[in-house]
Image (cartoon, helix red, strand yellow):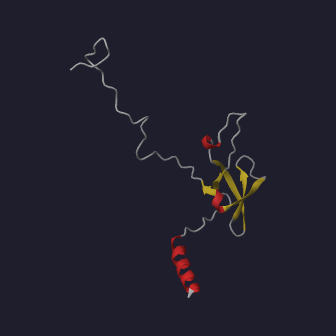
Amino acid sequence: MVEGQHDNRKFYADKKRKADPTYQHGNHVIVVSHPLSNAKQGKSAKLMSCRDGPYLILTQRPPSSYEIASLDNPGVPLGVYYTSDLTSYNNDTVKPLIPLCKLCRPPKVQQSTVSSSGCRQN
């Protein structure tokens, strides 16, 4: 009975699970980096970029790891990374649908009547 419930839960959980992406030789990817803070150099991990790249996929290491190389020197492998540490990189330059405003604050209003004390008079 317990095994049947376990299988039933697993079946429904696997339906929602996202499949691992598959990368081909020559695809561009971005790699997750884990920066460390350094007080002497004035670097804070919270403010550093958490992704680095783009890099080039060289080969697939079964079942879900990939060997990557730099775009400048594609013959020299940099390391093997798991699928969850890689994100596909699209070099397309797409304009945003809704451009961001600078601070999204209302514009300043000129005050016409100001007393000597700085208070507004009606």
Relative placement, left or right, of 20 versus 59 is left
User: From where the camera sits, is residue 79 visible?
Assistant: yes
Q: Nearer the viewer, residue 55 or 102?
A: 102
User: Position of 18 compared to 82: left or right?
Assistant: left
- Residue 27 in view, yes or no: no
Residue 30: give x, y in percent of width and height.
63, 52
Quarter placement of the C terminus: top left
Residue pushed farthest right? 76
Front-lying residue, 53 or 4? 4
The residue that appears at 34% across and 26% down in the rendered structure is 108
* Above or below 31: residue 25: below
Identify the residue at the far top of this view: 116
Task: Report x, y in % for residue 72.
Answer: 72, 46
Instruction: From the viewer's side, name the closer residue of 71 and 87.
Output: 87
Residue 119: x %, y % from top left: 29, 18
The structure residue drawn at horizontal position 54% and vertical position 70%, both measured from the top left corner, is 17
Quarter assignment of residue 60:
bottom right
When the figure is inspected, residue 94 is found, relative to residue 19, above or below; the finding is above
Q: Is residue 83 left or right of residue 109?
A: right
Count up the numbered dots: 0
Residue furthest toward the left? 122
Q: Outermost residue toward the front?
A: 117
Query: Vertically, is 111 above or below 116?
Result: below
Q: Quadrant of the N terminus?
A: bottom right
Which residue appears at 53% of the width and 82% of the height?
Answer: 8
Query: Going 45% across and 45% down the picture, which residue do you hit?
Result: 96
User: Taking 23 as reference, is 118 left or right?
Assistant: left
Tell me where residue 43 appears, x and y as whole percent: 67, 37
